[in-house]
């Protein structure tokens, strides 16, 4: 069995340890190197994944040259996704690249990221952690099976407390608008990218968005984005002032998705053990246990390697195609907020 070599480069975003954990959990994967300008910020990952000092780098070129990875995971600040995708793609003969959410800061950045990786013949994926939540995977299966008829609209709500436990130290860039901080940049991509997946890559006709900014801050703490589809209106709401962090205790309202179909509705909440369903035909309400995820669909690393080994295109929310549609909606939402108007999606083509 081939051992796939994985390197983690740029630890700006706290999710790098989670991504390396996904890689480490696969028996056919070896973490061959980690790299960050400030080596001390990698200490927890180095200890957790038993990475020897000769595999620890502060220079990404040396890391790539000496370890020769097959797959490179990058977690730069949001505004630097294009810069680091280009750096990795254009070094050597190219690598499969995993970028942690959000896909990019702008739609043009997203397209350029796709272009530079396509030129190497390798794969580019954007990891959205919610894509691997059993509740949302189960909801997608039920939609595809026709349980609730045609999917008409989506109601998404997500975020966190954004307190000092979440944003401090080397994560303070999240409070900088130019760096890609704020609740909209942090969470809207989740909602509209998985929403696009639920909608089978359908584009909305228009986007209208609003956001609130506290006095003395430059980033939003709360945003609402309304997407007009030909089937109805969908709402995507992000908050950075929740009463609790959903991974510790679900706040009210609960975080996740309400998926309204022509014949019923699915409630798929983050971390839930069941998805809740109500059907139009008899008003019946059901609790359906979430699916147990099976390999190679348990995490991004399993799935990406499966696609590489079998010469398959990447599909679903982590694909560049679906993530780009999500980025299109995020860009339209930002335009709407800045220009105080509804943005027709066709303006972005």
Image (cartoon, helix red, strand yellow):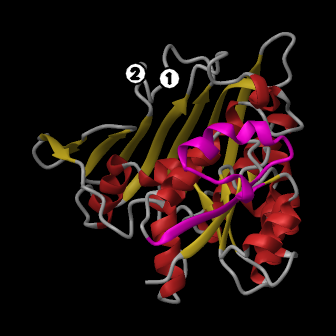
Label at residue 279: none
Queried whether the magenta region covers residue 231, the answer comes back as no
Who is closer to the viewer here, 90 or 146?
90
Q: Is residue 340 visible?
A: no
Q: Tell me where residue 337 appears, x and y as whole percent.
A: 79, 35
Asked which quadrant contains residue 175, the reply is top right
Residue 217 vs residue 252: left or right? right
Can you say whether 10 is above or below 184 in the image? below
Label at residue 245: 1
Residue 134 vs residue 79: left or right? left
The CA distance from mark 1 to mark 2 is: 6 Å
**In the image, which residues are magenta?**
28-56
Can you say whether 128 is above or below 210 in the image? below
Q: Are marks 1 and 2 in contact (CB under 8 Å)?
A: yes
Circle count: 2
Q: Is residue 256 visible?
A: yes
| Secondary element at tag 1 | loop
Queried whether the magenta region covers residue 52, the answer comes back as yes
Q: Which of the image's four quarters has the C terminus?
A: bottom right
Q: Which of the image's four quarters has the N terminus?
A: bottom left
How many C-alpha atoms fall within 10 Å of the one at disc 2: few (<14), some, or many (≥20)?
few
| Secondary element at tag 2 | loop
The residue depicted at 68 percent of the width and 31 percent of the height is 183
How many C-alpha atoms fall within 10 Å of the one at disc 1: few (<14), some, or many (≥20)?
many
Asked which quadrant contains residue 319, the reply is bottom right
Q: Which residue is mark 2?
A: 249
The residue depicted at 49 percent of the width and 83 percent of the height is 2
Who is closer to the viewer here, 115 or 140?
115
Q: Tell me where residue 210 appears, x and y as whole percent.
A: 71, 30
Residue 262 vs residue 48: left or right? left
């Amino acid at each position: 069995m081939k051992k796939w070599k994985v390197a983690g480069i740029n630890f700006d975003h706290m999710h790098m340890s989670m991504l390396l954990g996904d890689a480490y959990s696969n028996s056919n994967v070896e973490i061959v190197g980690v790299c960050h300008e400030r080596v001390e910020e990698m200490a927890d990952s180095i200890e957790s994944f038993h990475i020897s000092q000769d595999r620890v780098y502060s220079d990404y070129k040396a890391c790539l040259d000496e370890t020769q990875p097959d797959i490179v995971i990058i977690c730069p600040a949001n505004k630097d996704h294009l810069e680091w995708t280009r750096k990795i793609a254009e070094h050597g003969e190219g690598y499969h690249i995993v970028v942690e959410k959000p896909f990019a800061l702008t739609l043009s950045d997203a397209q350029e990221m796709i272009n530079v990786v396509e030129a190497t013949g390798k794969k580019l994926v954007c990891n959205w952690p919610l894509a691997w939540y059993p509740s949302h995977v189960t909801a997608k299966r039920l939609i595809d099976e026709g349980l609730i008829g045609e999917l008409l609209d989506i109601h998404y709500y997500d975020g966190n407390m954004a307190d000092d436990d979440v944003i401090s130290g080397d994560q303070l860039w999240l409070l900088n608008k130019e760096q890609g901080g704020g609740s909209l940049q942090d969470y809207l991509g989740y909602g509209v990218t998985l929403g696009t997946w639920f909608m089978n890559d359908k584009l909305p006709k228009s986007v209208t968005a609003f956001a609130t900014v506290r006095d003395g801050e430059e980033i939003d703490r709360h945003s609402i984005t309304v997407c007009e589809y030909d089937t109805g209106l969908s709402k995507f709401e992000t908050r950075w002032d929740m009463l609790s962090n959903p991974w510790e205790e679900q706040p009210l309202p609960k975080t996740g998705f309400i998926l309204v179909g022509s014949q019923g509705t699915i409630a798929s909440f983050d971390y839930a053990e069941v998805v809740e369903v109500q059907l139009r035909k008899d008003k019946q309400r059901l609790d359906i246990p979430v699916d147990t995820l099976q390999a190679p669909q348990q995490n991004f690393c399993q799935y990406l390697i499966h696609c590489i080994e079998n010469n398959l295109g990447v599909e679903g929310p982590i694909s560049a195609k679906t993530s780009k549609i999500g980025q299109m909606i995020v860009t339209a939402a930002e335009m709407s907020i800045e220009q105080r108007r509804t943005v027709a999606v066709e303006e972005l083509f």
